[in-house]
Amino acid sequence: MDGFLGSQVVHWQALFGRHDLPWQNTRDPYRVWLSEIMLQQTQVVTVQAYFARFLARFPEVHALAQAPLDDVLHLWAGMGYYSRARNLHRCAQDVMSLHGGVFPRTAQQLQTLPGIGRSTAAAIAALCFGERVAILDGNVKRVLTRYLGFADDLAQPAHERRLWELATQLLPSAPVLRDMARYTQGMMDLGATLCNSKNPACPACPLATRCVAKALGSPEKFPVKTRKLKRSAQSIWLLWALADDGAVWLSPRPTPGVWAGLYCLPLFEDRRELQAVVGQPGGSALKDLSPFKHVLTHKDLYLHPVLLRLQERQILPIEGQWVDAAQLARLGLPAPIKKLLS
């Protein structure tokens, strides 16, 4: 394929792309990797604050690797998709133990690390080391499918593999570090700022003169992906056992499962199950609080807190432990539980 797309994207990024994000203007793979993991399923405006806090606490990969997982989950709390945080921690440990604290320089090697998929590996390799390798995150899929008029259903693996092939063919021909980094950043910037899902800013796009979707007058129809996850709903009862000294009974959440790896109020499928576990006379002291809704990406959780006040710390017949206010501030808690307890 000709070099039109590559040259246009590189030129546009230099003049109009994003240059002020805290993880840009660096070839440090630790910072690029951290930002790429955080930006999966999370908006830039949210990530900026978390990114700053993570770097303050874990300025280098060895600091992250040596930290307790609870510290990592605590800083991650509120961003969701907590498997990212667990993989982040495991990846840092593997970088230290398997690679001497130095990130691999190729996308192929980077993919062997926990939590780093093909597109993330390519982003790190291209941005930091100038490797000529394509990324294909959600923004880039949108740009490429519109530019090419790629109308095949990306829900089918064969079609996604074909788009990967085309993305690779469209890469800048000269494997120059600056061009690869700028091209990779430019493709992400185009998808994030101009080539939006709805109401794309086609007149300002550097690819507009050769964009098939624009010529068809239907950019919003791309990319095509028919398989959609259905939303579901679940009701959960929370046992909020509170001692007079302010301590709260918390249980570690199992993996896999909702809020895996975090500390949480004990969860129950219904009120009857909760009362059966507490038993008498504790059950008579239960107080139902106002239920509230917490929205996950593909599920609505209807949470029903039930307060149990105790004069002193008693061992409850549920896995867990008493946690005082000082300990609470250091633990990873699900966002709705943290809000409830505060």
Image (cartoon, grey):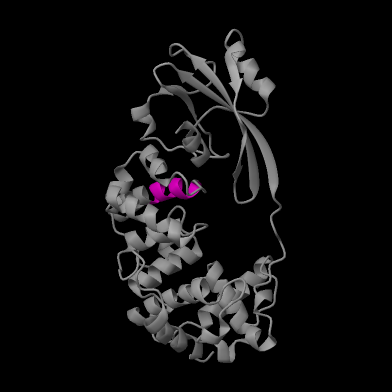
Query: How many labels, in total?
Result: 0
Q: Is residue 87 magenta?
A: yes
* Image quarter in which the N terminus is found: bottom right
Indicate the position of residue 292 as horizontal and vertical percent values: 61, 37
x 65%, y 73%: residue: 223
Q: Can residue 181 be seen here?
A: yes
Q: Nearer the viewer, residue 318 or 79?
A: 79
Vertical side of 302 occupied by 145: above or below: below
Indicate the position of residue 33 as horizontal and vertical percent values: 38, 60
x 68%, y 38%: residue: 234
Indicate the position of residue 263 as horizontal and vertical percent values: 47, 33
Q: Is residue 72 left or right of residue 306?
A: left
Q: Is residue 11 magenta?
A: no
x 49%, y 66%: residue: 119
Vertical side of 174 occupied by 145: above or below: above
Q: Nearer the viewer, residue 336 or 85?
A: 336
Vertical side of 209 occupied by 13: above or below: above
Q: Quadrant of residue 44?
A: bottom left
Q: Can residue 112 be seen here?
A: no
* Image quarter in which the C terminus is found: top left
Q: Residue furthest front?
A: 290
Q: Is residue 319 left or right of residue 155?
A: left
Indicate the position of residue 68 as horizontal and vertical percent values: 34, 38
Q: Quadrant of residue 318?
A: top right
Magenta residues span 83-91
Magenta-colored segment: predominant secondary structure: helix
